[in-house]
Image (spheres, grey):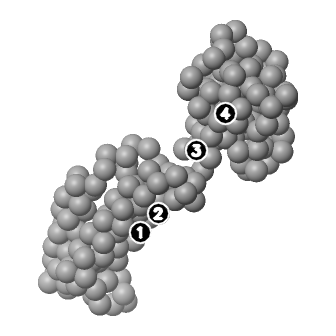
Amino acid sequence: MSWLTSSWSELAVVAARAALMYGTALVALRLAQRRTLAQWTIIDFAAAVASGAIIGRTAVADSQSYATGAVALLTIVAAHRLASLLRFQPLLGKLIDYRVRVLVADGQVRRGQLRRCGLTDNDLYAELRQRGVFDVRQLQYVLYEGKGGLTVVPRQTPPPVPLVADGLRDSTGYAPPGGSSSTGVTP
């Protein structure tokens, strides 16, 4: 039954380490970029999972000191910051970030792109219904953004739409008929 209970002194040490790690995490995350918590990419998710594991282990593992946990946490935050900066380099940005995918073009669902994104027709249709779209043929494009959101462009949108053109140019797996899109951009 000793695994169910602990002495008050052991519990006090755990509470102190947990409070110290929590304070360290708050300071470290405050020094990190805001995007860490607001807009998750794969680097953000990896940093969050690693940080949570470090904070939890440092709080409860007798074999890990606060200093070890704090150094590990600060290293993760620094590595995340470096990865965030490396995203601005074109080649590294392509390796770190997901690219835009064109899921619907000219009212036609592109099922191959859905599969590559791990989405089903029903996933797409549910998102469109939530946005008040009930007929795919009403759409010029549906872009699956790098962070997992959808951009829905109705057919009535007059070309060129600069941000849509940028998304089409940066997309993968999309070559418009005739070599150029209706936005005048050749992806």
Q: Nearer the viewer, residue 77 or 95?
A: 95
Q: Residue at x 56, y 23 (%)?
A: 162
Q: Callout 4 environment at 10 Å: few (<14), some (14 to 19), or many (20+)? A: many
Q: Quadrant of the C terminus?
A: top right
| Residue position for label 4 | 168
- x then y, percent, for residue 26: 22, 57
Report how far apart the C-alphas of labels 4 and 1 lie in the structure.
Answer: 34 Å
Q: Nearer the viewer, residue 73 or 7?
A: 73
Instruction: Assess whether mark 1 and mark 4 are in contact (beta carbons under 8 angstroms).
Output: no
Q: Nearer the viewer, residue 144 or 84?
A: 84
Report how far apart the C-alphas of labels 3 and 4 lie in the structure.
Answer: 12 Å
Report how far apart the C-alphas of labels 1 and 2 lie in the structure.
Answer: 6 Å
For residue 94, above or below residue 4? above
- Precedes in sequence: disc 3 or disc 4: 3
Q: Residue 50 shows which numbered tag?
A: 1
| Residue position for label 2 | 46
Q: Give amino acid for label 2.
A: Ala
Report how far apart the C-alphas of labels 1 and 3 lie in the structure.
Answer: 22 Å
Q: Residue at x 74, y 20 (%)?
A: 182
- x then y, percent, for residue 158: 65, 10
- Precedes in sequence: disc 1 or disc 3: 1
Q: Callout 1 environment at 10 Å: few (<14), some (14 to 19), or many (20+)? A: some
